[in-house]
């Protein structure tokens, strides 16, 4: 039914039947984006990380050449040439080029609220992968580091308040991702402590006995961490959630007539 329906007209049509009004309830939500998370946690993504972008090259030519040395010695050298390779020595490596681009960005956005290091890490990330390391570091920041709730330190946005209690809900695409993050958190030296944290995977393929705990409020001093798909966004209600971490990915079933 449309939100703009004329309830009075409907009531009159049905012989002045009573109209029951149920007001909507909204809660104040503070949205933090990826850049905010990276800057607040000080997260560092190494170049060889599985969650970093990979520079791919296409081999254009390969072969071998004979090289003559001193005293008439000879040696066969094998080579590969890739698209984009040049005969001249590169003046800058990839990291230096990235720094140059960041300098340009600094000129174009002098008022940017994010640091150079934050922008560097964002550019290095592979958007097609779920960064479990970053999620784990964010959990450490929320649950262990005890960030200032005033939001006036050098890492948090002005006015940001991170709740020190309540459940944490993490959205993931599917059961494989839930299991991967579950295993990672379960092996953490602090987050795996059952006296401080209650880790619950929520999915239709898992045992319902353990999942029922997702809807219960744990004892004081224990923080609940729920791993779920976006079904928890509309299909179920977890009343004590105060923090939501969205991986930004979801599996969607689509139909196309061409298949």
Image (spheres, rainbow, N blue to C red):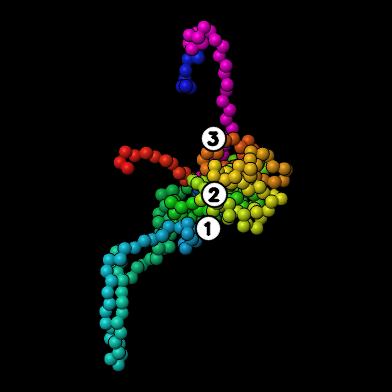
Q: Tell me the quadrant of the picture where the C terminus can be found.
A: top left
- Label 2 SS: helix
Q: Image check: 41 left or right of 6?
A: right
User: Where is residue 27 shown, x and y percent of the image?
Assistant: 59, 32
Residue bearing mark 3:
235
Q: CA distance from mark 1 to mark 3?
A: 36 Å
- Label 3 SS: loop
The residue sitting at 48% across, 60% down in the picture is: 49
Q: CA distance from mark 3 to mark 2?
A: 18 Å
Q: Looking at the picture, tell me which residue is in the foreground, 25 or 35.
A: 25
- Circle 1 packing at 10 Å, graded few (<14), some (14-19), many (20+), is some
Residue 49: say if magenta.
no
Magenta-colored span: 9-33
The residue sitting at 54% across, 55% down in the picture is: 133
User: Where is residue 66 shown, x and y percent of the image?
Assistant: 27, 82
- C-beta proximity under 8 Å, tags 3 and 2: no
Looking at the image, is mark 3 or mark 2 earlier in the sequence? 2
- Circle 3 packing at 10 Å, graded few (<14), some (14-19), many (20+), is few
Residue bearing mark 2:
178
From the image, state whether disc 1 or disc 3 is nearer to you: 3
Looking at the image, is mark 2 or mark 1 earlier in the sequence? 1
Look at the image and tell me whether residue 129 can be seen.
yes
């Amino acid at each position: 039914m449309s939100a703009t329906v004329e309830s009075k007209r409907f009531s009159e049509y049905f012989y002045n039947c009573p109209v029951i009004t149920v007001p909507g309830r909204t809660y104040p939500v503070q949205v933090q984006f990826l850049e905010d998370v990276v800057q607040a946690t000080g997260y560092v993504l190494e170049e060889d990380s599985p969650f970093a972008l990979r520079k791919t090259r296409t081999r254009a030519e390969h072969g071998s050449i004979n090289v003559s040395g001193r005293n008439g010695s000879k040696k066969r050298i094998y080579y590969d040439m890739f698209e984009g390779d040049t005969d001249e020595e590169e003046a800058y490596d990839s990291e230096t080029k990235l720094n140059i681009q960041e300098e340009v960005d600094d000129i174009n956005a002098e008022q940017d609220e994010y640091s150079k290091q934050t922008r560097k890490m964002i550019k290095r990330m592979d958007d097609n992968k779920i960064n479990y390391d970053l999620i784990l570091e964010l959990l450490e920041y929320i649950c262990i580091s005890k960030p200032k709730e005033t939001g006036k330190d050098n890492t948090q946005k002005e006015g940001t308040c991170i709740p020190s209690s309540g459940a944490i809900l993490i959205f993931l695409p599917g059961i494989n991702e839930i299991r991967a993050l579950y295993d990672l958190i379960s092996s953490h030296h602090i987050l795996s402590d059952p006296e401080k944290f209650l880790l619950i995977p929520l999915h239709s393929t898992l045992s319902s006995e353990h999942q029922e705990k997702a809807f219960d409020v744990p004892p004081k001093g224990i923080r609940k961490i729920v791993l779920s798909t976006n079904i928890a966004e509309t299909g179920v209600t977890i009343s004590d959630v105060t923090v939501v971490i969205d991986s930004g990915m979801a599996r969607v079933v689509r139909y196309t007539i061409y298949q």
